[in-house]
Image (cartoon, grey):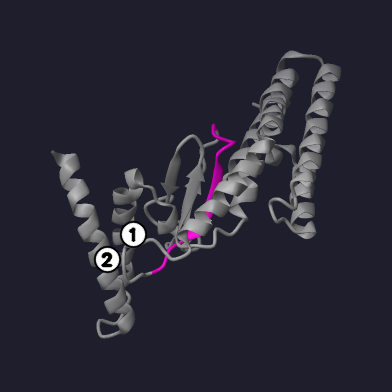
Amino acid sequence: MAVPAEIQFAAVVALIYLLDGLVLLHVNEGVVERGRRLRILFGSAQPWIAGKRVLLLDPWRPLATAWRTSWAVRASLDPPPNAESARALMDERVRVLAVLDPYVIIVWALVLVAAPLALFALTTAAFLLVAAVAWLSVWVLVVRLACLRKALDLSRAAYALVAFECLACPPVAANLPRKLSLRMPTGSDLVAFVDAPARAAVHRQLVRDLEARLLFLDLESSAYRDAAAYRDLLLASAIPAMTDEET
């Protein structure tokens, strides 16, 4: 039995949007998601694709920025020296990206909701009109991004690539804040962006990753000693929080 063209169209649009929110992370990486609240995301429990973890960003939170950030073995749990400036830079870029929010919501509604529904419920001519309006909204979004290029420190080449992706494939435009933030360097270790409520959970995740790393290191090497010392520091900080949760 053939699948109706309307269902195929809606499925393709949804699949493109979902795949654009798929992030592959090295085991020493996480994503700092900045929406109404801050979340630290590490993806799947195990590496599944080319030794990388799979993280699917929440499709219902297109305005939440997502910042790919790595972490390294450190000698203490104190914030990195550049933590304050890195957080200030991220805050500033989040503020600038928020200017795009109304345009992104319009694109999201037109491309992912209105166009598929029009194909199901309206005439072909009406669908083409809705699709044209949706594509025009993507153009407006891309032009508005051009005005913010310098504030976001986007090179001409980077802007041209993002603009081409959005115009060539409108479902991608509905994911623009996350697409942009994922490509921007954070300039500091992951722990610089961890707030107190998430600290214990993040430390437990780092402990698990460090324990896995230790299995492949020479017991007599300095890398093993450094990783083990950092694991012990993280483990000591996570134990009190675990005890509080249990009580």
Position of the C terminus by quadrant: top left
Tell me where residue 223 appears, x and y as whole percent: 33, 79
For the image, the number of numbered tags is 2
Circle 2 SS class: helix
Indicate whether residue 5 is drawn in magenta: no
Q: Amino acid at mark 2?
A: Arg
Query: Does residue 193 sit above or below 14 in this rendering?
Result: below
* Residue bearing the label numbered 1: 206
Tell me where residue 106 appears, x and y as whole percent: 70, 27
Locate residue 204: give its quadrant: bottom left
Q: In the image, what residue occupies the spot 59% across and 36% down? A: 63
Tell me where residue 231 appears, x and y as whole percent: 27, 66
Label annotation for residue 231: 2
Do the residues under discs 1 and 2 have CB atoms within 8 angstroms? yes
Magenta segment: 60-72
Tell me where residue 28 appears, x and y as whole percent: 43, 63
C-alpha distance separating marks 1 and 2: 8 Å
Label annotation for residue 179: none
Mark 2 crowd level (few <14, some 14–19, many ≥20, 10 Å Cα): many
Locate residue 174: give its quadrant: top right
Q: Amino acid at mark 1?
A: Leu
Indicate whether residue 71 is drawn in magenta: yes
